Amino acid sequence: MVNYHVANVTDDLFVLRVDDRYTKYFEALWEIPEGITYNAYLLKTEEGDILFDTWKRQFSSTFLEALERVTSPDKLKYIVVHHMEPDHSGSLEDVLRWAPNAKVLGHPLAGRMMNAYPRAKAKFAPVKDGQELVVGGKKLKFIHTPWLHWPETMMTWMAEEEILLTCDVFGAYGIPLALFDDMCIKKENVIRSTRKYVVTVIGHYREWIGRNIQKLENMGIKPKVIAPAHGLIWRKNVEEVVQIYKDVASSKPKDNKALLVYASMYGTTEKLARGLECALTKEGFEVATYGYNDTARPPLSEILTDASDSKVIVIATPTYEAEAFPYLKMVAEELCWKVGDGKKVVIAASYGWSSAAAEQIKKILEGCKYQAVEIVKYNAVGPTAIKDEEVEKIAKKVVEAVKG
Ligand SMILES: Cc1cc2nc3c(=O)[nH]c(=O)nc-3n(C[C@H](O)[C@H](O)[C@H](O)COP(=O)(O)O)c2cc1C
Ligand SMILES: [Fe+2]
Ligand SMILES: [Fe+2]
């Protein structure tokens, strides 16, 4: 059974939210055991109703069921497409089949991406950045917010109600029981799942977060309610969610946080990693540790989330076929892609006969402006080959580099 909600945001504005507990890997990439919601909105006016976005295709029949609770095909006048990613546009064709007379509005680029939805494309009319639309006494303003998350993405500002419909922006992973942030929520979970969403989904375009927030500020837009297409509707801590987005966009570090990522086939690197974790903890660091070994494959989504507010990143890799461990090469590349540059990195590499593993990770990370402050290489085959004293010696070096 699909769980969904239809609730009032105001007397005339409804949220239609579906709880997606089925997607294991969002965008086929990001591990989300906490799930995700897709929020569409419906505004009722005297001249007809306006739908903002839809749900992922898998839920389209349930979406129509939800829509029928608040509108009808003859009443649906407009469908505003904020974003063409199929988690929001996937049910468009089914909605148009149900309400064939509705007109579809979106950024001109959205129209060019609509080939999968011929009914929607046929009813499409482009709207410009800053364009206003008055329907049944309700005033809407469309604001183009490029690269949050795609080039065509836009928001809708309801000036009188001071509500900003933001699509992906200010969204989060997770399926909170509450619909609104002023209800009973698990605050730390919400903050974590918001950070995780920003890093993984919008992290690559992080520069655009500040730019678009500035654009909204320059337009004098100060929403009382932020209504995104994922997660909670914000009406109490509006400034807080904006701040979370700004902090993640700039990869703002906590003073004492370190991320330690390692891989270990036979326990050698793991032995060192435990020593590093212990030494960093003793130094007052809060260490987020993730290890790839023969029983664990840690989620990349969590590693990147912890990277974003870490002050320092430590990568410990065995040499594997003359290179760094495959998953760690991927971690290093994604650190470049999704998380801000300028952070300190320490790399430790073990090898059996000859190694370029450390240099390889260094090259990837320095290519995107991380600073490699220490590189340690040590020869060992098997955990007993690395003595406790050597672990201590390396850990001391690492701590000094991190502090320096
Ligand atoms: C499948 C495999 C491939 C390896 N390839 C290399 C290599 O190309 N060059 C090298 O110097 N050592 C190589 N080694 C040795 C390891 O890098 C070294 O023993 C390391 O300390 C193992 O760490 P671990 O026990 O944490 O996996 C290899 C080991 C394994 C198991
Ligand atoms: Fe998106
Ligand atoms: Fe989305």
Image (cartoon, rainbow, N blue to C red):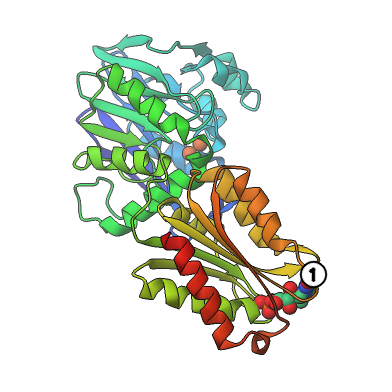
| Nearer to me, 307 or 116 | 307
- The answer to whether residue 1 shows anywhere in this view is no
Q: Residue shown at 55%/74% (left/top)?
A: 394
Above/below status of 168 relative to 173: above
Q: Residues within 10 Å of mark 1 (few under 14, many from 20)?
A: few
Instruction: Provide residue 107's location: percent of width, then percent of height.
Output: 50, 17
Which quarter of the figure is the C terminus placed in? bottom left
- Say which element carries label 1: loop
Q: Amino acid at mark 1?
A: Ser
| Nearer to me, 41 or 397 | 397
- The answer to whether residue 373 shows anywhere in this view is yes
Instruction: Provide residue 81's location: percent of width, then percent of height.
Output: 47, 24
For disc 1, does the CB lie below 8 Å from ligand 1? yes
Instruction: Provide residue 241's location: percent of width, then percent of height.
Output: 29, 42
Instruction: Provide residue 307's location: percent of width, then percent of height.
Output: 47, 55
Specify the quadrant of the image occupied by residue 227: top left
| Nearer to me, 202 or 334 | 334
Specify the quadrant of the image occupied by residue 327: bottom right
| Nearer to me, 152 or 11 | 152
Q: Residue shown at 29%/58% (left/top)?
A: 188
Does 104 sit left or right of 165 as displayed?
A: right
Q: Residue shown at 70%/64% (left/top)?
A: 325
Above/below status of 86 relative to 264: above
How many marks do you count on the picture?
Answer: 1
Above/below status of 276 relative to 261: below
Q: In the rendered image, which residue does mark 1 sit on? A: 354
Specify the quadrant of the image occupied by residue 269: bottom right
Does 56 sit left or right of 248 as displayed?
A: right
Above/below status of 385 relative to 403: below
